[in-house]
Image (cartoon, grey):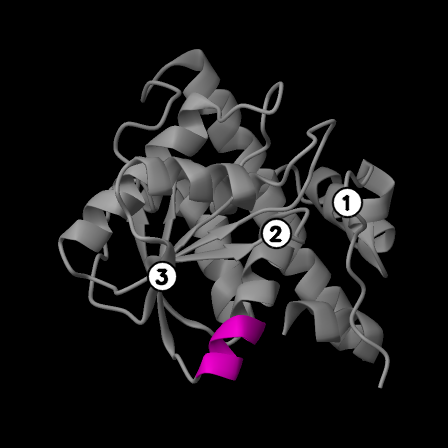
Amino acid sequence: MPQPYHAPPHASFLQKLGPGGAASLGLALLTLVGLAGLPWAFRLRQVLGGVHGDESSAADAILVLGRRLEADQLTPVFVARLAHAEALWRRGLAPRIFVAGGATGTSARSEAEAGGEWLAARGVPGSAILLEGRSQHTLENLFNVRAEMRRAGWRTLLVVSDALHLARAKATAQGLDLAVSCSPAPEAPPMRGSLAWWRRAALEAFLLHWYHTGMLYSRVIRSERQLERVT
């Protein structure tokens, strides 16, 4: 049976799109223009709503979503995610931590590898650190971790990222039929209410709209090749 499409390491934007990606992006843009930005405003409300909640609960595993490295080093955002995951692990909310993310941009190592090294340096034992080092974006982070969880017989996942990312991460996880709760990294930049924070919120609102547009488009045209990536 053919395997679902996965973007290659260091994938370009076009390579990350995969089957149906360009069409769904075009539809997302058209609906924004045709509906005077209302879908974006609706998704922005969802993004901002996710900032206020912390659903931390016991799970089979904690998942730290990857973040692109800069000059092969962790960014402050990625460090904040990892630190929060470590704190949740030390509280006993899960016995293991997944770190997701492949080799992106110009990095010589994967996001997962760099994040795993950071956790190990903080005293998290290797037996509690699981690396998913293939994925190129959030959808693939969750898709690949789901496969590992199914093989191991694990069911529940506690997802860690920065607050503005979690609405999209949760929607994607639920689309993949994952039982998830979400916990935002409180120290992750940018500073809440800053211009950079609002820019990120605006982008996340569009990406969330694009995700839902792509899901609907794939179901309407009944494309098995597209649906196997997102469900």
Looking at the rendering, the stretch of residues picked out in magenta corresponds to 147-152
Marks 3 and 1 in Cβ contact (< 8 Å): no
Between 105 and 130, the residue placed more toward the observer is 130
* Mark drawn on residue 133: 2
Residue 225 located left or right of residue 112: right
Between 28 and 68, the residue placed more toward the observer is 68
Which of the two discs, 2 and 1, labels the residue nearer the N terminus?
1
Whether residue 162 is visible here, answered yes or no, is no
Residue type at the position of mark 1? Pro
Task: In the rendered view, tell whether residue 82 sits above or below residue 191.
Answer: below
Task: In the rendered view, tell whether residue 153 sits above or below residue 146.
Answer: below
In which quadrant of the rendered view does residue 48 lie?
top left
Give coordinates of residue 130: x percent, y percent: 45, 59
Which of the two discs, 3 and 2, labels the residue nearer the N terminus?
3
Residue 143 located left or right of residue 191: right
- Residue under the point 37% across and 14% down: 194
Give coordinates of residue 27: x percent, y percent: 79, 51
Whether residue 44 is visible here, answered yes or no, is yes
Residue 213 located left or right of residue 114: right
Residue linked to disc 3? 127
Residue linked to disc 1? 9
Give coordinates of residue 202: x percent, y percent: 53, 30
Residue type at the position of mark 3? Ser
